[in-house]
């Protein structure tokens, strides 16, 4: 598995539905970019000015809501993941 560095987090993005409530099938370019996913790996945390680690406020397994265009998409073992910074996460979904 991928191991993120610093304050980076790896998220398995939740795929959006391909149909609307009315049953219309959407083309892939018409779907909105997903904003939710499950954390699969968390880095050690960012360094502050004194060189001390700041522990991340999220953990593996958390379901999160993140900025729409945050991070970088990567493919690993035929799975799509999003690598983003902790600051790009807006909320934990409970």
Image (spheres, rainbow, N blue to C red):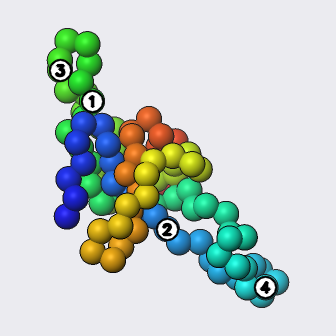
Cα separation, mark 3 vs mark 1, equals 8 Å
Label 1: few (<14), some (14–19) or many (≥20) C-alpha neighbours in 10 Å = some
- Mark with earlier residue (2, 4): 2
Which element is circle 1 on?
strand
Image coordinates of residue 42 in percent, x first then y, are 26, 48
The residue beneath circle 2 is: 14
As drawn, the residue found furthest toward the top would be 50
Q: Residue at x 52, y 59 (%)?
A: 36
Asked whether the beta carbons under mark 4 and mark 3 sit within 8 Å of each other, the answer is: no
Question: From mark 2 to mark 4, how far is it between C-alphas?
Answer: 20 Å
Residue at the image point whose x is 59% and y is 72% from the top: 16
Q: Mark 1 and mark 4 in contact (Cβ < 8 Å)?
A: no
Instruction: Give the residue at mark 4.
Output: 24
Whichever of labels 4 and 1 marks the residue nearer the N terminus, that label is 4
Q: Earlier in the sequence, mark 2 or mark 1?
A: 2
What distance separates the C-alpha of mark 4 from that of mark 3? 52 Å
Q: Quadrant of residue 53?
A: top left
Is residue 55 shown left or right of residue 87?
A: left
């Amino acid at each position: 598995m991928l191991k993120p560095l610093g304050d980076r987090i790896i998220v398995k993005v939740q795929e959006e539905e391909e149909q609307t409530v009315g049953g219309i099938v959407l083309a892939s370019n018409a779907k909105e970019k997903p904003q939710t996913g499950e954390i699969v790996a968390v880095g050690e945390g960012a360094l502050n000015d004194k060189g001390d680690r700041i522990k991340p406020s999220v953990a593996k397994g958390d379901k999160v809501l993140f900025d729409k265009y945050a991070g970088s998409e990567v493919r690993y073992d035929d799975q799509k993941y999003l690598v983003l910074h902790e600051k790009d996460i807006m909320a934990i979904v409970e």
